[in-house]
Structure formats: C-alpha cells, structure tokens
Amino acid sequence: MRISFGPLPSSAALAVFAHKDVVLTRGAQARDDAGRIARAGQVARFEGDTASILELLAPQGVDASRLLVVGLGAAGKADRGAFERIGGALAAKLLTSGETVLAIDMDGVDDIGVSRAEAAARIAYGALLRSYRFDKYRTKLKDKQKPSLADIVIANAGDSAGKIFERLKATADGVYFTRDLVSEPANVIFPESFVARCREAMAGTGITIEVLGQTEMAKLGMGALLGVAQGSVRQPQLLAMRWDGTGGAQPRPAVFVGKGVTFDTGGISIKPAGGMEDMKWDMGGAGAVAGAMLALAKRKAKAHVIGVCGLVENMPDGNAQRPGDVVTSMSGQTIEVINTDAEGRLVLCDAIWWAQETFNPEIVVDLATLTGAMIISLGHEHAGVFSNDDGLAQQLIEAGAAAGDPLWRLPMGDAYDKLIDSPIADMKNVGPRDGGSITAAQFIKRFVKDGVKWAHLDVAGTVWSAKAAPLWDKGATGYGVRLIDAFVEANLEAK
Ligand code: BES
Ligand code: MN
Ligand code: ZN
C-alpha cells in the first residue's frame, strides 16, 4: 500500500467525515448538494458512530467513483485508536472493491480528541495494518478476490502528518514482519529459516545478531531446551538480536524473550489431530519479539533492547524425550518432564537464564503462546500478564492499552509455586489442570534471578485470530509488536 499526504486525486473513492448525528465536516458539506448525505444516511441508518461508514456509489455531481462518509462519533472524542479504526474500516471496505485509489479529505476534521495531523497519520496507520494479506500460496485467486486498492492519498491533513506517519510506519513494518513469520507454515518456518528471515529483514538496520546452535547450547548445559528439540530433525537455534540506540548510555538492557516453537505436536504426549495445524503459530511470541526489534531499529528508538528467541520444533520421534525424563537446565535446576506438551516453559527457562547471564538485564519480559488455559480464562481479547514487579506490570498494561494490544494481570504466589514441586527433581514441568496458566508462570519465575524485574505475557489467545477485527484480517494479528514498541517508547527511551 502506497500512502501519501497531498492534494486530492480525481475520480478515486473519496472519504469525508461526519460527527455523531450526521453533523457534516466541511469536506462532507462540499459534496452534499440537495441534502443527499442526510437522506442516504437515513435510509442506511447511518448515525455518524465512530468508524461507521455510509457508502454512496457513483454519486452524481461529485468527482468520485464512490463517496464514503465516515463517522467520527461525539464531538471532541475521537482519539488515536478511533482514527486507527477508521483507517482500518476504510481499508477493509475498499481492499478488494475494485477501487485502486482512496482519497481522504480531512478538510474541516476538527473538534476531535487529537490534532488533525495526528488523526490523518493514525488513519494511514490503521489502513496499513488492516490491509495486510498473506496470499503467497493462493495461486488461483480470481481477479475479484485480489486486493485492488494500492494508493491512499490524504489531503488537508496538516503539515506534520507525514512525519508522524513515518514513525508509525516503522511499527507497521514490524507488525508485517511478525505476521509473515506467524502465517508461514512449519515446513517453511523452522528454527534455522526463522533465523535466516531475521537476518534478511534486519540487514542494514543496525541490529546485531548472534545465534547459538545445538553444539553451543549443549556446551552451556541447556538440557531443558535441548530436551524439547531432540525429537526433531530440525536444529534448534537460540537467536539474540541487539539494538542499542543509546550509544552505550544504558549498560543494562531490557530483554524480550520469545517462545519460538515452530511447530508443537505435543511430542510423545501428542496432541489430538483436530486443530493441530494451529500449532504452526506456537512461535508467535518469538515472532512478536523479532517484529518489535525490527520496528525499534527502523524508528531508531533511543533505548538498549535485546530480543531473544528460543527456537525449536516439538516432535515425537524415536529420539524424542519421554514423560518422566529428568533434564538439567542451564541454571543447574533439574526438571521432571511429566508432559512433553508443556514444552514452552522448557524452552523459555534456558533462554531466559542465558539472557540474564549474557546481558545482565534490568528487565526481562517474555512472550509465549504458553497455555490453552489462558484462552479459557481471557478468550481472545486480552493476553495475560504475570509479574514479580507491580510497577513493570502496570507499565506493560498501560503500554498495551495505548497501543491496542491489551493485557490483563493474573496472580502468582507460593501456594501456586508448591504445585510444581517434584518428588524426583527440583520441579516438574506441569501442575494440576486447575490454574494451568499460573503454574506455568510460576515455573518460569523459578529461572528469574533476584533483582531482575520480570513479566511473562501469555499470548496464546491473541497472536492468531479466527475472525477479522478492526486492524487485522483473520490469521496472524502481530500481537505484541505494538505493545513492546509502546512500552519501550514510554519507559525506556531517553526523552
Ligand atoms: N502451545 C501450547 C499452548 C497453546 C494451546 C497455545 C492452544 C495456543 C493454543 C503449549 O505448548 C501446550 O501444549 N500447553 C499445554 C500445557 C499442558 C500440557 C500443561 C496446554 O495448554 O494444554
Ligand atoms: Mn505444547
Ligand atoms: Zn507449545
């Protein structure tokens, strides 16, 4: 999608605006001879609600193939999120409509909750996010099914719109990268190809990449991560991506650690066949971390951030680990593997320990599609956050709310921790069924060093969507990229 801020092109689809109760902005009034919009609005029950759209096809006397009157809601109210949703709604409506150009007239879009330039940039950002598609393997799409919309031109946006959008475009690029990684099937994205994609996308951005393979990880004693990987013919990889936009001024970085199980069959504790294909996106946490790193580097964030991805494939095999096996993690703590399908925590515990030893971070935040129980508790509207630090939890929740990746906090405590004690090792990798997301978090907490602020985001319900939403189509959502980006901007960047 090409996005520009400039004069209105002719004979495109044209969007103009109306507040609640169809109070027309100047741009809308200019195309409303004979009260056409009010009449059409009545017919279509259009009331000017936020991001609702009234569509007039081939309107007479207007230089446009169709006129879209877009609701702004109550006067003074429309905020950044509202304008992102507006952009998303326009993109969704026109993407395969046959229109190639969307012109948006911001003339008279005032009396809103943000500056007009901010509004215009957010519309562009929302439209970009919503127009992502993953069509590369669909070779027989009819022309009518293919995206037609290629250009969005926003007029009367105010001088700084382009500059604000440039900043947002970096984040959108990160979201697109994450969605590509998450959408790809597991025969295409496996640990080594995940790393290759990151190298390619991050070349020239200033990110430095370090990768450990099986041999290096064995030397470091990562028995937990390697135990998961041993049933697969794919080599595991531990990927670290460093972005330092401070020139060394922040010696202790923030580290984001992603669960990157490129396919989760469950291993010997094999999952049922129905729906197992979903487990290609069991690397959604790692995908979000990689996309966020790309976004931070593209916008030259003034912070020192490291993204670590623990990449493995969890397969059943003659060499796969068995229920009852005891593995020794890099931390020296031993783990009884009761269920080989609780593999994410086994990957994370070594990745997190290595990250702490290697980078001496002040903050560690992990993102993982860790438990089905998370989906039972929060559905698909929030990811869960668990933390040893109230301040960090609050900062993450606020960043998530502002960025459109919402979080909800869940409790932790000693009584939950006890549930993963093992009679044969230091801990077992599963507790009882009840409180399954919390005992998973307790497991990870046992690998967080004293004095490190840590949060665990269980994103099992949010990285993939069965239905379209304002800012994504069904499929990979890119959840986590905007959250990390906003968290870094609000809390880590030198202002
Ligand atoms: N990757 C799954 C969790 C998951 C399930 C994510 C469904 C998204 C959708 C994880 O590795 C897993 O299998 N967890 C088990 C843990 C159980 C064995 C304690 C689960 O949730 O059933
Ligand atoms: Mn599993
Ligand atoms: Zn998993």
Image (tube, grey):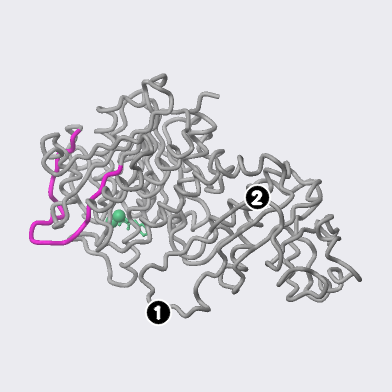
- Give the magenta range: 309-330
Q: Tell me which residue sits at (33%, 24%) in the image.
A: 450
SS state under label 2 = strand
Foreground: 412 or 263? Answer: 263
Q: Nearer the viewer, mark 2 or mark 1?
A: 2
* Residue 105, image x, y percentages: 74, 56
In the rendered view, would you say 49 is above or below 417? below
Q: In the image, what residue type sits under mark 1?
A: Lys
Q: Dot 1, how many residues are within 10 Å of its Cα: few (below 14), some (14-19), or many (20+)?
A: few
Residue 432 is labelled as none
In the rendered view, would you say 369 is above or below 67? above
Residue denoted by label 2: 5
Q: In the image, what residue type sits under mark 2?
A: Phe
Q: Can you say which quadrant of the picture contains the C terminus?
A: top right
Is 105 positioned to the left or the right of 39 in the image?
Answer: left
* Residue 362, image x, y percentages: 38, 25
In the rendered view, would you say 398 is above or below 197? above
Specify the quadrant of the image occupied by residue 455: top left
* Residue 326, image x, y percentages: 13, 45
Is 256 positioned to the left or the right of 465 in the image?
Answer: left
Q: CA distance from mark 2 to mark 1?
A: 35 Å
Residue denoted by label 1: 140
Q: Tell me which residue sits at (33%, 56%) in the image.
A: 282
Is 46 positioned to the left or the right of 186 in the image?
Answer: right
Q: Tell me which residue sits at (28%, 37%) in the image.
A: 209
Is 258 positioned to the left or the right of 42 in the image?
Answer: left
In the rendered view, would you say 6 is above or below 160? below
Q: Is residue 315 magenta?
A: yes
Q: Earlier in the sequence, mark 2 or mark 1?
A: 2
Q: Is residue 431 magenta?
A: no
Q: Tell me which residue sits at (41%, 39%) in the image.
A: 412
